[in-house]
Amino acid sequence: MKMKMHKVLPISAAAMLFAAMATGAAADEVVKIGHVAPLTGQIAHLGKDNENGARLAVEEINAKGLTINGQKIKLELDAQDDAADPRQATQVAQKLVDDKVVAVVGHLNSGTSIPASKIYSDAGIVQISPSATNPQYTLQGFKTTYRVVATDAQQGPALAQYAADKLKLKKVAIVDDATAYGQGLANEFEKKAKSLGMQVLSHDATNDKATDFRAILTKIKGENPDAIMYGGMDATGGPFAKQAKQLGLRAKILAGDGVCTDQLASLAGEATDNVVCSEAGRSLQAMGKAGEEFQAKFQKRFGVPIQIYAPFTYDAVYIIVDAMKRANSTDPAKILAAMPSTDYKGVIGETTFDSHGDLKHGVITLYDYKSGKKTPLTEVSM
């Protein structure tokens, strides 16, 4: 019996190796693309939305087949949770570097994207944020930082301009959540509002974990503003708007893309219809047929509607693969070298970058809510 086993095993092993080679399994090179967003905490629904967009792109590319420099490539999404916490963001960024990802889509927040960016820069790894809008993110001098949305230096002024020109508002109070995103957006709004002759009655700060805004809102009620601009995310912006209505404030609530989600209706209730908000990109409706097709694919794959930036993470993965193809390499250094000449037409439109890694042609979309449903008002090209 022992003699037979010695004879059979080498033949069996050879057959297994031949079968693996015949199916091409042994020929695939696994290439990791990182993705980081908050998958736990108050805005986990936004983080999962971003991750799902990136995952859909990876699955599509693998299904179609990808070959780089004669080598069959299988993409793998290395998805990590930064919990919207700057400290955890840097730890996760280092983990992705150690995992040898070739590029990163993320992070979601400005307050996490900025500290993580130095780690990716030191490693020479491309970072494309789909949703970080603080201008500072791309102004640090790093060659690795890119984004596929407009910045708060565009979003804040667009929101203020709309408030002055279309809503005819004269007096505004400002509240921000003291994060890099919320504070940065509020400051940009305030500068533009003042330059347009609007009276800024006050500027208060809360935090991104707050749930009770009645003290700030009671003070603001005494100031009698036409509007309150809130810089923060929907998890706090929703309760903020709801409590403002409960206290009898007539003021419009103005907010940026962090608040401007489909989830807002469940967070703010009837107060949603008093909100005007902005997104640092084109609406799904304005994306036309590409937007409709993406929405249908996303809904079919994940069984939930798009929150906000899933189309942007989806395109970000394709932009990384486009750089791989043009570089004919999966080497992070060569992918990075190919990024400045990006000219990619995807779901969100045409993506080209300036010398900082910002979009050459940013777009801001303004929305309001009708019976809890987010509806585009106008698009501003920057």
Image (cartoon, helix red, strand yellow):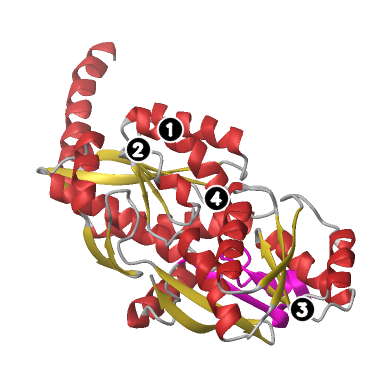
Residue furthest to the top in view is: 2
Which badge, 1 or 3, comes first in the chain's sequence?
A: 1
| Farthest residue, direction left | 70
Disc 4 residue type (three-letter): Asn
- Seen in the picture, residue 276 relative to 14 is either above or below; the reply is below
Q: Does the magenta stretch include residue 372?
A: no
In the rendered structure, which disc, 4 or 1, sits on the residue that comes first in sequence?
4
Is there a contact, CB below 8 Å, between mark 4 and mark 1?
no
Q: In this view, does 104 lie above or below 47?
A: above
Image coords of residue 298 (percent x, y): 45, 69
Percent of width and height locating residue 299:
49, 72
**Residue denoted by label 2:** 142
**Numbered disc in front, either 3 or 4:** 3
Kind of residue indicated by mark 1: Lys
CB contact under 8 Å: marks 1 and 3 = no
Q: Distance between the residues labelled 3 and 2?
A: 41 Å
Determine contact: label 1, label 2, CB under 8 Å: yes
Q: Give the labeled residue for mark 1.
A: 118
**Which quadrant is the N terminus positioned in?**
top left
State how far apart marks 1 and 3 are (Cα): 41 Å
User: How much space separates mark 1 and mark 2, taking CA atoms?
Assistant: 8 Å
For disc 4, the marked residue is 109
Query: Which of 20 and 162 lies nearest the eye of the viewer?
Result: 162
Q: Nearer the viewer, mark 3 or mark 2?
A: 3
Q: Which comes before the other along the chain, label 4 or label 2?
A: 4
Mark 3 lies on a secondary structure that is loop
Distance between the alpha carbons at the discs numbered 4 and 1: 15 Å
Mark 2 residue crowding within 10 angstroms, few (<14) / some (14–19) / many (20+): some
Query: Which mark, residue 251?
Result: 3
Q: What stretch is highlighted in magenta?
A: 254-280
Q: Which residue is drawn at 55% across and 69% down?
A: 195
